[in-house]
Amino acid sequence: MNDIENSRTGTSPEVTLVDNPSHERFELLSDDELVGILGYRDEDEISGSGAEAGDVVAYMHTVVKEEYGGQGLAAVLVQFAMDCAREREWSVRPVCTYVQRYLGEHPEYLELLVED
């Protein structure tokens, strides 16, 4: 796991958010159980994840286990991923339709999107 880690609480279960670059995904854990992922890919690399500042990173898919659905956890995961992109100076290509919808409701992240 990477050094970026965050815990949040609220009406949802307590969750931990981490970047797992060896699996090219952000992970959402509840009580140490993996319950959601947001997969990404560094567009400059065919395989592996060596994204650096200035790289374009595609956010490929967001998945939350069905039994954890309806709690806003996917949004928490996408927000974490977008905050990581901002911190790392990545440009984001939102391939995932959930990420696209999230960005439609959160214009504060639009400057991170890659310009085609």
Image (spheres, rainbow, N blue to C red):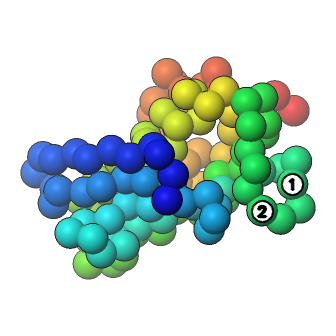
Is residue 112 visible to us here? yes
Q: Nearer the viewer, residue 114 or 44?
A: 44
**Three-letter code for the amino acid on which mark 1 is drawn:** Glu
Residue at x 87% of width, y 32% of height:
116
Q: Position of residue 106 (x, y in %)?
A: 46, 30
Residue at x 41% of width, y 67% of height:
36
- SS of the residue at dot 1? loop
Mark 2 closeness class: few <14, some 14–19, many ≥20 residues within 10 Å? few
Query: In the rendering, which numbered label is found on residue 20?
Result: none
Residue 70, above or below 54 = below
> On the image, numbered disc 2 is attached to which residue?
48
State yes or no: discs 2 and 1 in contact (Cβ < 8 Å). yes
Residue 68 picture quarter: bottom left
**Three-letter code for the amino acid on which mark 2 is drawn:** Gly
Q: Position of residue 4 (x, y in %)?
A: 45, 44
Q: Report how far apart the C-alphas of labels 2 and 1 lie in the structure.
A: 7 Å
> On the image, numbered disc 1 is attached to which residue?
45
Q: Position of residue 58 (x, y in %)?
A: 72, 50
Is residue 91 visible to us here? no
Residue at x 87% of width, y 54% of height:
45
Mark 1 closeness class: few <14, some 14–19, many ≥20 residues within 10 Å? few
- SS of the residue at dot 2? loop
Residue at x 59% of width, y 35% of height:
85
